[in-house]
Amino acid sequence: MTAGWAPEPLAVRTDLARGGRWTSLAAPGREWLWHHPDPAVQAARASAVGPAFVDAGGGEECLPTVDGDPDHGAVWPLAWQPGAREGEAAVAADGLALRRHLAARDGVVRAAYRVSGAPGQELVHAVHLLLDLSPAARVRLPAVGVPCAVREERPGAPGRPRRWSAPWPPRVGEHDADRLGPDDGTAAAVLVPGCDRALVVDGDDALELRWGADHDQPVSLLLWRNLRGWPAGAPYRSTGLEPLLGATSDLAAAQQVSARGGASGDRGGAARLDASGQASWWLEVRTRRRPGPQDRPGQAVGASSPGGPSGP
C-alpha cells in the first residue's frame, strides 16, 4: 500500500459546460491528466456537440456506454447543471440522469455517482481518465492471472480489431500490458472484470485508484494502452485508466447477451438499475511520492533508495 511513500495533496478541476470533463488532477509539481497537444483538437473538443467523440484528453464521463453507439456515450458533449452543494452536478441523456458529487479532502479526490432511470434499465458508466505517463510507468493490479478481454487495433485494418482473452497482464506487442514502455505502434483496450483498484507507478510518483458500487453491481477496469498505434494515419500516444460500473465496455453487446440469457438472468456485463430505478457507485483517487534522500531520516545522500510501492 505504497508503504514508506509520502501522501501528497491532490486537487481536481472540471468543466461543467463541456461534459463535466475532468480538466486537471494535480499534485504539487505534477499534473496527472494528459491533454492532446494539438490546439486544433482542443478547439474541436471545446465546440463539440456529438456524436463523434473528440479525444482531447482529461477525464470524460462515458454513459450509457464506452464502445459502440454513441462512441464514448451520450453525456460527454453535454452541459452539466450545477447542484445545490459545492462539487455537485448533474446531466441527463438516453433516459438516464447522472448525478456526481466531486470533492477533494485530506489528499483524496472522491467522486460519488448516482444514476437514475427506469427500474431494470441497463447501462455502463466509465470515468475515462487519460493519464500523462512516461514510458517507465507500470500499472499494478490485484488481478494477476484473472482472464481479461483484449481488443487490439490492427494497422491497415481500421474498425476490424483483433480480439482475444488472456490472463492479466496480457502481452501486447513486445511487452506485457502492465508496462507502458516506448512507442511500438500498438494500441489495445484491456477489460479486467471485477477489478476495483489500480496503482500506477511512474518514477517517484504513484497514483492509486479505488472504486466500488452498491447492491452487488459489477465493476471493472478498462485500460487503454495506445503507444502510437491509433488512429490510423495520425497515431499518437495516450494511456487511459478507466474505472467502470459494469463488466463490459459495450452496452449494446451486453444487451444482446442479456436478451439471450432470458430466465438465466445473464446481463452480459451491464449494470442494471434496481427496483427503485437507482444505481450508485464511487471512485477515490490519491497520490504518493517516494521520499527523497533528504526526507529519509538516517539515510545519507547517495544511499540506495527503497523499492517501489507494493501493489494495491
Image (spheres, rainbow, N blue to C red):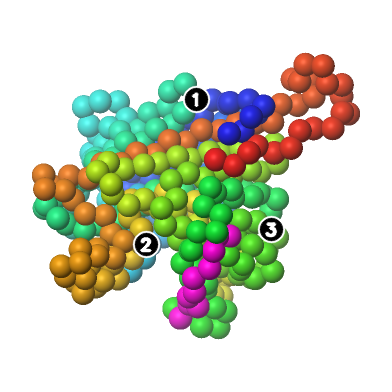
Residue 37, horizontal then vertical, whole percent:
57, 53
Q: Is residue 100 left or right of residue 225?
A: left
What residue would you read off at disc 2? 249
C-alpha gap between disc 2 and disc 3: 25 Å
- Tell me whether the residue at label 2 lies in contact with that at label 1, contact meaning CB atoms closer than 8 angstroms: no
- What crowding class fits label 1: few (fewer than 14 Cα within 10 Å), some (14-19), or many (20 or more)? some
Secondary structure mostly seen in the magenta stretch: strand
Three-letter code, disc 3: Gly
Q: Is residue 40 left or right of residue 254?
A: right
**Going by the picture, which residue comes out furthest to the bottom?**
156
- Tell me whether the residue at label 2 lies in contact with that at label 3, contact meaning CB atoms closer than 8 angstroms: no
Three-letter code, disc 2: Ser
Which residue appears at 11% of the width and 48% of the height?
Answer: 275
Determine which quarter of the picture holds residue 45. bottom left
Which residue appears at 26% of the width and 71% of the height?
Answer: 257
Magenta segment: 160-169
User: What is the number of the mark on residue 181?
Assistant: 3
Q: Does the rendering let one see residue 168?
A: yes
- What crowding class fits label 2: few (fewer than 14 Cα within 10 Å), some (14-19), or many (20 or more)? many
**Going by the picture, which residue comes out furthest to the front?**
264
Which residue appears at 33% of the width and 69% of the height?
Answer: 68
